[in-house]
Amino acid sequence: MTMLQPYFFDEYVDLYERGIIPFNKERIQLIDYLKKEVLIRDDIYFDDEMIQKFVRYAEKNFFPLAKYQKFITPFIFCYQKEDDEVFFDEILNSIARGGGKNGFMSARDSFFISPLYNVRNYDVTITANSEKQGKVSFKEVYEMVQMNRLETQFYLTKMAITNRVTNSIFSYRTNNPKTMDSARDGCLEFDEIHQFESSDLVDIQRSGLGKIKNPRTFYNGTNGHVREGFYDKILERAQKIFSGENKNDRLFPFICKIDTIDEMDNPKMWSKANPMFEEDTSYSRRLFSTVKKEYDKLQEEPSGRREFVVKRMNFTEGDSEKDVTTHEKLMATNQPIPDLKIHSCVAGFDYASIRDFATVGLLFKEDDKYIWFQHSFARKQFLDTFKLKAPIKDWESKGLVTILDEPSIDPRHLVDWLVEKRKHYNIEIVASDGFRMDLLRPLLDENEFANEFFRNPRGVQAKVAPIIEDGFANERFIFGDDPMMRWYTNNTYIKEDSLGNRTFLKKEPIRRKTDGFHAFLAALYKRELIAETIDYDDAFDMLDEIEF
């Protein structure tokens, strides 16, 4: 089988295979994916002439390209033979701060609007959370034009750079929905994507692509503190590509990060997160020295550790003293939910507030795993008033939450959900804290659900805390693909008293909801009532006796 050999690919991979530079897990996965799924194809080709044009252009007008930038470049100019449309129409570049994301962006974007690319009206737009960030690459291109005295080729304004030959425009915008008109964009750049709370602004702008041939979208960023936002979602997409789960996805995911937190203490591993350290240049040496000084400073100022890990190592560690679990362990809950029909389970409620959110869920046990799935209810007026950053509408479309337009959340919604689930599962007991038990208990009794309400929820939490710690640490919890449950968990922190008792509290009282996590806690407290085995004859007899 003949394998395509794009420029720079073998050279870069060879450096890793010979042990000269270390690759992180995601880069190894990318190489494996390209070899097995892309480079063996006979229906694509690389435009070698365009690749060389871009490299010469970038190095003449901006800077010598780093090894990783050259490695990515051929896949920007990879096309389908059938229609000459670009093969990878989305490219992710996730690397640590200082890795040259903006410089690479400036070089390719100015190239796209130039006669060398030679596509008329191929507009390029950068979108960032702030005007300051959006202007970084724009300013670089602006200054390049002035420095090289190319004003005869480009028309410059404070907001746009227009090539006089191609009529292509390079501009920037903030993520204001009022400025999202993408009437003729050929290329979209999204910068600092870790700040995007959802995919809304990306979806709006990408909906305008396709009017110009070979539309491209680039996602650029370093890890941040927004969880379950756009950044986490695109990393999930990358993993589905690497695993072979989604072979039709045309995202090119280039991700650089340390593999474990221990690698932060080994400077030889820092290039896993920042491929600029693979270079022998004055810039890379100066950058390494800066990062080393920041690392050494952590000995005296450990409060800066979390920011260092996120920005310089492109890694999410979390706050081990407060967070329920690490980001990686929380993501490990995204395992397929097995067939649980007729299985024994216990239900958990959180109905502490009737004005905003409420959650009900079922907890199952299979071998040493606990399987949990939940459903939430949220008041429309609350959502309209407080404008939560979480993508509630997306979760509604996934069936994870029901939005109610009513003065308060009627407890019948939660009980009705349980009644429906009882058609499929054997619910041993319904558990909740004692708050608002006067509203719930009559409805549960009416529907013949065994129930228990806790008078001392803090005591319950203290007893469940070791199970929570062990369950996440050893990946015994399965939530399925439930970003809302992960959001609930991320919004929760642990408070430990002088006796070592742990309670689970909200990180922020209004917008950071924790209802699903507290429903999960209630169910875990009654976990011992989950039957390990089911007498299927008795279970079916039970179902026959229920009047549906």
Image (cartoon, grey):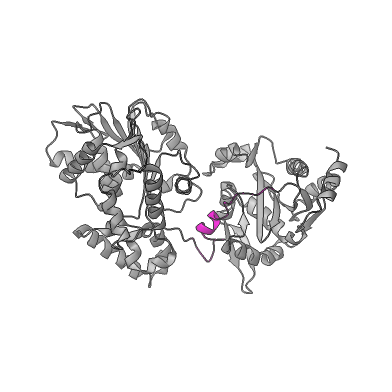
State whether residue 78 appears in this view: no
**Residue 362 in sight from this viewpoint:** yes
> Which of the 4 quarters of the picture holds residue 540?
top right
Q: Residue furthest left?
A: 149
Residue at 48% across, 49% down: 243
Is 90 on the left or on the right of 503, as rendered? left
The quadrant the N terminus occupies is: top left
Identify the residue at image location x=71%, y=66%: 459
Which residues lie in the magenta part?
318-339
Q: Quadrant of the C terminus?
A: top right
Query: Does 420 sit above or below residue 224?
Result: above
Q: Is residue 324 magenta?
A: yes
Q: Position of residue 169 (x, y in %)?
A: 26, 31
Image height of 193 relative to 21, above or below: above
Q: Nearer the viewer, residue 168 or 494?
A: 168
516 sits to left or right of 112: right
